[in-house]
């Protein structure tokens, strides 16, 4: 856990808003706006924020499933944003993604065998005669019956489908996985099974994870470090335990206060944020959070807060907590 | 597609496939339209294939005894079950041979429509942007010119023959298909399993034709059936106007055209080719409607 | 919304241009030599050649297209080889007849289709619904020219209630309109039926029911009114197509409209008439669908313009 596998520098993904007869660009939705972080080998970086904060766009931009409009993404020291088509194709064997919706992420017309052998065919990873064996060992690895290969997705439960989605991502033996809210659509009891599977796989295969979630409790135990996003920007990043024990950004505090406490005596005051998430096409001036921040002061409305390292490896963007 | 190795044997797959087929049949049972339509189409196909065996007479032979003494067509009789036409030819045999023309033109031109429509709709929907705009402009242009008139003009250019009628209908009738496919592709390409294929490094061709295509098949099949109806009627209309299949080759359309001369005193010259035409179109319409109800989950719920 | 209409207009202009290219290519591809057609079989080779040059037939294709486009912009669709009169005049002479026929067919479809649609929707999934829906399927499957001939035989020839074709007053219109009505009404019936079933499932209809409004009142005040919007769109596009002449009906009933004119022109190899009619009809269809689009976007504010 030393050298960074992935280094992201001021990543930006803006979507143009087109209007009028000539479809002129009249503005941009700043879905991801200047995000920088690095992930070390074998590490899990949790990425947390409300829906619409740009975390999904960020995950997909890192993989170039959505083309970023600015910044750099270095994978093992090489900037993948400059990759050619064929280089990008090879990169797909290194970086994979697991999707949120287990009902939409498997092709309904494919038998599981087809879904899982597709990566093997695309990257020519084994001879046709070995494919069934590979598919079955992948199924076994994610805890499914090898005979499930001949079934169709609709014959499985949500948790089983998510395991198939994970198996598909593992088929190319990737080093890094972007997990895009992999358990958000599952029942709580199934969530922990899938999370445990992911932890086991990470240990066995030495995988690096970027784990995107909308609530902190899910990422707490699986993440080594956690990044909090708000409106496409970074609010705070810290080691998981540090973030939970010593949250600095008011937004992180609000997210934390929403987690139910296991110990009924340890009451924590629930911070309820007022108002809606602002429109990312027209973000507030100064600190983007000031419209909903319970502590906001005049300085927050005019100046963008700097990114400060408050304690070692604990960064925050807040005027009041720096 | 599947390698029958390791733990799964051939017979396992065979059984799985057979039970899948059974469950499909069980489903279809609730949609009698598919059965009735399928039966009609199957019978027509048999008639078309075995026309030489089924036809009692040579369809193009003008029988001496096929006309009355004053030279008019004979009514249905034991020898000529559907009567004869103004040339003394056996109408039953001509209707039987006409099945070949209608089915071949209807189905083959639909396949041409299908290939062009799926290709245009897929490229437009998948690539979007200027490719979409350009292809949809072409589609709109094709759709703006009334179909039959367009076919008439093209057949006038190519010359009236079986092949040219088939080509004209095939080359001009793909507009609606392209629109339907494009709409489906626009929706499906945003699905996560398509994103997953991209993340795996699948090529555009692979994504279009392996990931997306199987999922647009439902609506495409439904529309193809209705398309066959339109094309059968278009061929009949062209032949009826005298710019389609030419005499002496029997087509239901040109038989009706001939019937116009004689229907006032020999109405059977009109009835039988028209009935055959109606039954054929009805068969494909039933199949189309049946497939649509079957694929549309809402219709399975019944009354709300 | 203004931008939406302007964009629609712009795309229609491109489509119109596309149509002129299609018609021009078809004209050019027709094997018959116009100069020979105009001068007749017995003209000398030299005279034919001179006329070809006079008509500009020896010029390269793109130039001929531009000349064609230029004359179109002046409202000149060319001269008929056979009748030796401007195509524009011929079209104008027959437009009234086609419009009159179109109106008749349209009204027949609506008169038959809409009541059946309401009826089958109110008895959805009952035996009468199935019966009428099956009949509608048969209606859709009927070849329109054949049905026309059967009706001519039965009501025109045997019972002599209606004339055996030709253009005239209402009496002449009844059979062609009825023919088209029978084959086309099914589309209105099906559309209205499914649209009503959809509206009946919506919240505000349930609310109206829950408030205790009588069944009839709910159906007429809430359901039919809203369910008619898609039917009206279809009716708008439908009349646009009908106006351009229903070739098969016009040929069957010897109704001298645009469709029959195009058909005769094809039989005569009268290229300018064929292409003039095809072009004009296509333009009409494009303009009409544009109008329907605009009216619909005003009627139904849910349409998004971007």
Image (tube, rainbow, N blue to C red):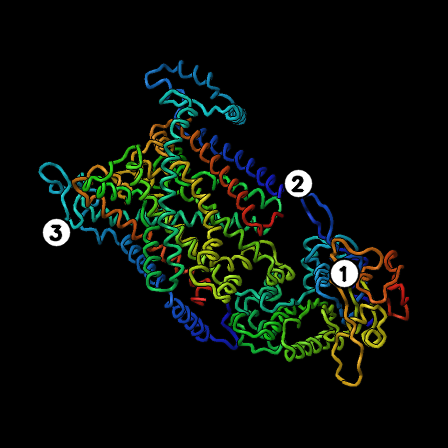
Task: Give the Cα distance between marks 3 and 2.
Answer: 73 Å
Task: Report whether residue A143 is seen.
Answer: yes
| Furthest-left residue in this view | B69
The mark lying in front, picked from 3 and 2, is 2
Labels 3 and 2 in the same subunit: no
* Apparent side of residue B16 relative to residue A25 in the rendered image (left or right): left
Q: Position of residue A314 (x, y in %)?
A: 87, 70
> Label 2 belongs to which residue?
A22
C274 and A164: which one is in front?
A: C274
The kind of secondary structure element at disc 3 is loop
> Label 1 belongs to which residue?
A231
Could you tell me how many numbered marks the image carries? 3
How packed is label 2: few (under 14 Cα within 10 Å), some, or many (20 or more)?
Answer: few
Task: Report whether residue A317 is seen.
Answer: no
Q: Circle 3 marks a residue in which chain?
A: B
Earlier sequence position, callout 2 versus callout 1: 2
> Label 3 belongs to which residue?
B78
The kind of secondary structure element at disc 2 is loop
Q: Position of residue C255 (x, y in %)?
A: 32, 33
């Amino acid at each position: 856990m030393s050298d960074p596998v992935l280094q992201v520098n001021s990543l930006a993904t803006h979507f143009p808003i087109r209007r009028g007869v000539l479809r002129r660009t009249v503005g941009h939705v700043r879905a991801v706006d200047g995000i920088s972080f690095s992930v070390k080998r074998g590490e899990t970086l949790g990425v947390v924020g409300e829906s619409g904060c740009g975390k999904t766009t960020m995950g997909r931009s890192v993989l170039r499933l959505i083309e970023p409009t600015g910044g750099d993404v270095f994978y093992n020291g090489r900037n993948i944003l400059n990759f050619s088509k064929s280089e990008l194709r090879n990169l797909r064997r290194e970086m994979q993604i697991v999707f949120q919706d287990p009902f939409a992420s498997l092709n309904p017309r494919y038998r599981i065998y087809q879904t899982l052998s597709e990566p093997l065919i695309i990257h020519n990873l084994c001879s046709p005669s070995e494919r069934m064996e590979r598919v079955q060992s992948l199924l076994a690895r994610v805890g499914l019956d090898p005979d499930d290969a001949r079934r169709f997705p609709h014959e499985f439960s949500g948790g089983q489908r998510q395991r198939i989605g994970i198996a598909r991502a593992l088929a190319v033996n990737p080093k890094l996985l972007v997990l895009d809210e992999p358990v958000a659509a599952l029942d709580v009891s199934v969530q922990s099974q899938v999370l445990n599977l992911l932890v086991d796989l990470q240990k066995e295969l030495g995988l690096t994870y970027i784990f995107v979630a909308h609530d902190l409790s899910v990422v707490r135990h699986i993440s080594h470090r956690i990044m909090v996003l708000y409106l496409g920007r970074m609010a705070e990043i810290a080691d998981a335990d540090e973030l939970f024990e010593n949250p600095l950004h008011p937004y992180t505090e609000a997210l934390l206060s929403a987690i139910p406490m296991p110990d009924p005596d340890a009451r924590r005051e629930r911070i309820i944020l007022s108002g809606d998430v602002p429109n990312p096409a027209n973000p507030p001036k100064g600190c983007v959070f000031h419209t909903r921040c319970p502590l906001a002061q005049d300085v927050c409305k005019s100046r963008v807060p700097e990114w400060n390292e408050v304690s070692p490896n604990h960064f925050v963007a807040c005027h009041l907590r720096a | 597609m599947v390698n029958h190795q390791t733990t799964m044997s051939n017979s396992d797959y065979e059984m799985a496939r057979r039970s899948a087929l059974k469950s499909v049949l069980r489903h279809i049972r609730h949609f009698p339209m598919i059965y009735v339509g399928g039966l009609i189409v199957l019978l027509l196909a048999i008639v078309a294939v075995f026309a030489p065996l089924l036809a009692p007479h040579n369809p193009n032979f003008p029988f001496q005894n096929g006309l009355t003494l004053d030279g008019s067509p004979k009514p249905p009789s034991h020898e000529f079950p559907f009567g004869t036409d103004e040339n003394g030819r056996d109408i039953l045999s001509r209707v039987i041979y006409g099945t070949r023309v209608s089915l071949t033109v209807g189905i083959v031109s639909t396949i041409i429509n299908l290939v062009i429509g799926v290709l245009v709709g897929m490229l437009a929907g998948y690539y979007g942007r200027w490719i979409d705009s350009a292809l949809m402009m072409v589609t709109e242009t094709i759709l703006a010119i009334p179909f039959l008139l367009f076919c008439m003009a093209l057949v006038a250019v190519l010359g009236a023959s079986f092949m040219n009628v088939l080509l004209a209908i095939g080359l001009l009738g793909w507009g609606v298909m392209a629109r339907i496919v494009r709409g489906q592709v626009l929706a499906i390409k945003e699905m996560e399993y398509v994103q997953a294929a991209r993340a795996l490094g699948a090529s555009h061709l692979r994504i279009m034709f392996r990931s997306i295509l199987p999922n647009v098949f439902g609506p495409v099949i439904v529309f193809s059936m209705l398309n066959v109806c339109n094309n059968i009627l278009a061929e009949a209309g062209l032949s009826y106007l005298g710019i389609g299949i030419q005499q002496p080759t029997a087509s239901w359309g040109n038989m009706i055209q001939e019937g116009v001369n004689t229907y006032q005193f020999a109405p059977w010259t009109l009835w039988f080719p028209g009935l055959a035409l109606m039954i054929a179109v009805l068969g494909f319409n039933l199949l189309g409607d049946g497939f649509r109800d079957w694929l549309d989950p809402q219709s399975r719920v019944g009354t709300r | 919304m203004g931008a939406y209409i302007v964009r629609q207009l712009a795309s229609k202009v491109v489509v119109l241009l596309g149509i002129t290219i299609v018609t021009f290519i078809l004209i050019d591809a027709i094997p018959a030599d116009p100069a020979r057609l105009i001068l007749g079989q017995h003209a000398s080779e030299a005279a034919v050649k001179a006329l070809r040059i006079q008509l500009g037939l020896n010029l390269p294709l793109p130039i001929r297209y531009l000349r064609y486009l230029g004359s179109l912009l002046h409202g000149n669709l060319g001269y008929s080889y056979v009748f030796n009169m401007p195509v524009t005049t011929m079209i104008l002479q027959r437009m009234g007849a086609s419009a009159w026929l179109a109106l008749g067919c349209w009204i027949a479809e609506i008169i038959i289709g809409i009541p059946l649609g309401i009826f089958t929707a109110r008895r959805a999934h009952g035996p009468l619904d199935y019966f009428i829906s099956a009949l509608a399927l048969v209606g859709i499957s009927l070849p329109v020219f054949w049905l026309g001939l059967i009706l001519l035989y039965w009501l025109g020839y045997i019972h002599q209630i209606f004339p055996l074709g030709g253009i005239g007053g209402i009496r002449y219109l009844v059979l062609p309109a009825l023919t088209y009505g029978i084959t086309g009404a099914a589309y209105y019936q099906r559309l209205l039926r499914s649209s009503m079933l959809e509206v009946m499932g919506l919240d505000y209809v349930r609310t109206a029911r829950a408030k205790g409004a009588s069944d009839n009142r709910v159906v007429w005040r809430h359901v039919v009114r809203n369910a008619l919007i898609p039917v009206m769109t279809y009716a708008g596009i439908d009349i646009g197509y009908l106006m351009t002449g229903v070739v098969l009906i016009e040929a069957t009933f010897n109704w001298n409209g645009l469709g029959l004119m195009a058909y005769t022109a094809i039989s005569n190899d009268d290229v300018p008439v064929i292409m003039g009619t095809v072009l004009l009809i296509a333009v009409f269809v494009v303009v009409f669908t544009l109008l329907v689009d605009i009216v619909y976007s005003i009627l139904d504010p849910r349409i998004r313009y971007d």
